[in-house]
Image: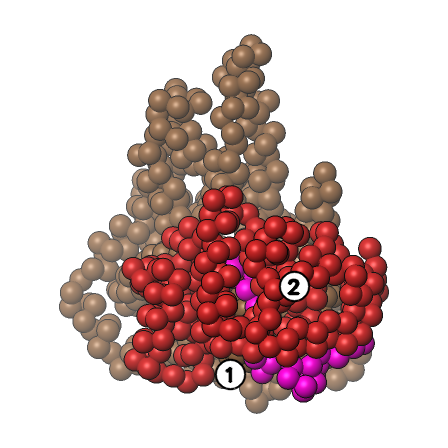
Chain colours: A red, B brown
Amino acid sequence: MLELRNIAVDYAGQPIISNLSLAVATKEIVSLVGPSGSGKTTLLRVIAGLEKPRIGSILIDGSDVSAVPTHQRGIGLVFQDNQLFPHLTVEQNIAYPLRMRGQSKADCQPQVEAMLQLIGLQQFGSRHVQHLSGGEAKRVAVARSLIAQPSVLLLDEPLTGLDTELHDRLLRDIAALLRARGTTVVHVTHDLREATTLSDRVVDIREIGAPCK
Amino acid sequence: MNATTSPYPSASRWLWLAPALAIAFFFGFPLVTIVLRGANLDGLIDTYTNGSILRMLWFTAWQAAASTALCLALSLPATYALSRFHFRGERLFLALLTTPFLLPTVVVGAAFTAVLPSQLHYTAIAIVAAHAFFNIAVVVRVVGAQWEQLSLQLSEAARTLGVSPLRAFATITLPLLRGSITAASVVVGLFSFTSYGVVRVLGGPARSTLETEIYTRAVLIGDLPGALALSIGQMLVLSVAVAWWMRSNRSTNQMVLSAPHRTIAQRGRQRIVLRAIVLCTSFVVAAPMVALAWRSLRTANTFSLAGWNAVFSSTTTAALQTSASFAIVTAIIATAFGLLVSFAVAYGSRRYAILELVSVLPLTVSAVTIGLGMLITFDVSPIDFRSAWLITPIAHSLIALPLVVRTTLPVVRAIPNGLREVAATMGANRWHRFRSIDWPLAQRAAATAAALSFAVSLGEFGATSFITRRTSETLPVLISRLLSRTGDTVQAHAYALSTIFVISSIIGIYIADAMRKQQVSR
């Protein structure tokens, strides 16, 4: 379970988020909606530990992780523009979190292959990530985060910029994948239709705290 | 651009002629002379099996490698600070790091003589430290240009996958910077390998590198065959290094980069690290330059203005006049010929691209070899130019030419042909189109190239020390001569002249920065 208690965030002296609280149950998918500039992405970065809140605390399964560095929080984040590592292949990108935990290439291989199958990119393992289409790159980004088995997965406007057909297909695929794996998810979007399709609960960020905009 | 779309088809057919002939005569001819006179198998074997030569080559190689490693260690933290953060005084910090690279190598040698205790003079440590100091700007500029465009979110993504910041740096940032780090390392290694002025001042009689050995053999002990054999070996090494450098440059350009992404240090630890980097690097870089000024005011362990009074002596005034006139003529020749190359390559068909390659060839030959080539080629009738005043600015122009082409060619190439076509529809003939479109858009790059050529000439020491006469001594040659003499006042005189170079460089950087800011604000 993820709990945010009275989070306030400032940037360059200006309040971005103030007094925001939210609880997300284990295996629940929650979509945060709100207009541009309402602090949605900032909130995800705070949960991931990439930004520090001025006040407030973040709890995962009852433990306060506010002071825990990003890499020890066990939280995955799929960036809006994927941030696939351009010097690695699809396979190497997906295997990256496992390799960094000390697993050998041979040990990683079955998990990577299973993940490639799950996202429907079995033939793409050795492909360079710069040669992927927008939808393929997005699947790889989600797979890379999921293989690390995060306790909470954060999705930052994951389907922005895709054409309608691809957007809808990918939305269905990702929803099915997340439900099958029982992942706890906080999803950020400004698209209400996407939010209702993907999530168990839709929360307007303006209603759970007081974003200063 | 192919011949059918050339905006100036008739001009592009003859523009290449003058620079090609000049490069062939003043660069190609001396090199061919070196090869023909030095490519004697027995002579080459004798030279390259000589124990003292092998020791000298080993020293040249390892000091270049050590200088590169030290330079990277010193520059990468500063590059990180400048590429990733905005902080107060960042412009001043960058200007400080850039200054050493603009100093004549003899002045860098003088600065390390001034700052290091006498026990460290004429040691490998002094040479390696001076090379690292001189080349900081190369790493900061080359690696920094790529680092600041590397998305910050890539390492953040690694951290959300359970990787510590240090590991994220090692597995993501460093591999992505490898192209630019390699390119910068090759340049620093190349400069350290071919360093001449620094080794002349700091090496003393015991420490010799390939460049100083060529000078010693050709000028001091009269072993011309030995000097020629060494020059041939050096040309081979440099050609391989330059080819590698051009390849690493290409791989850097192929990287996928994001818009510049810098931030303000927010966390306490980040701020402490940033301050520590800026303060430590500033101290290391400023100390030799401050020591120069300090030593210029000391004679016989007391405060004295004797060194500065000597600056107004007739010898110094003459050297200043010589240096300034050489620099002005170099700026004119190098810029004119460099622009002709750029226009010929940009306007001509693909076959003219070879001229671009030819114009950067002087990079594959050290200044000392250029000087040696001219010395042995142009001292026989009917081409006895050696005593001609113009021979020194011509040598300087050859050294500056690759810089001029690299500065102006991208600008000329980037001028959209549509502008000329619009002008043509408005009745402008070819000459008017060139005068109203091409020249105004290229003239800022031409001015930058002229300033670069001027600076190259002002600080040039390697080729100059071969071909200049005592009656036309330049400032770097005068500084080197003063430093090699004993006597506190003579030394203070050399330090005072070096201090003038430091101050001029700082003013030059400030003016260039102000001009750049003005350009951006427009």
Disc 2: host chain:
A
**Residue located beneath label 1 in the image:** B125
Tag 2's secondary structure?
A: strand
Q: Which residues are magenta?
A: A55-82
Whether B471 is drawn above or below A57: the answer is above
Report the quarter where the N terminus of chain B lies. Answer: top left
Considering every residue shown, the one lying at the far bottom of the view is B119
**Residue located beneath label 2 in the image:** A201
Whether A40 is drawn above or below A94: the answer is above
Report the quarter where the C terminus of chain B lies. Answer: top right
Task: Based on the picture, tell me whether residue B471 belongs to the magenta stretch.
Answer: no
Image quadrant where residue A91 sits: bottom left
- The number of callouts visible is 2
B490 sits to left or right of B402:
right
Please name whichever residue, B494 or B83, is drawn nearer the observer in this view of the structure: B83
Please name whichever residue, B54 or A63, is drawn nearer the observer in this view of the structure: A63
Considering every residue shown, the one lying at the far left of the view is B42
Tag 1's secondary structure?
A: helix
Q: Residue at x 62, y 86 (%)?
A: B117
Q: Residue at x 78, y 59 (%)?
A: A206
Q: Residue at x 59, y 22 (%)?
A: B436
Residue B156: mark in rendering? none
| CA–CA distance in space, label 1 to label 2 | 67 Å
**Contact? badges 1 and 2 (CB < 8 Å):** no
- Badge 1 and badge 2 in a common chain: no
Whether B517 is drawn above or below B476: the answer is above
Q: Residue at x 69, y 44 (%)?
A: B520
Question: Quick one: label 1, few (<14), some, or many (20+) residues within 10 Å?
Answer: some
Question: Quick one: label 2, few (<14), some, or many (20+) residues within 10 Å?
Answer: some
Image quadrant where residue B58 sits: bottom left
Q: Amino acid at mark 2?
A: Arg
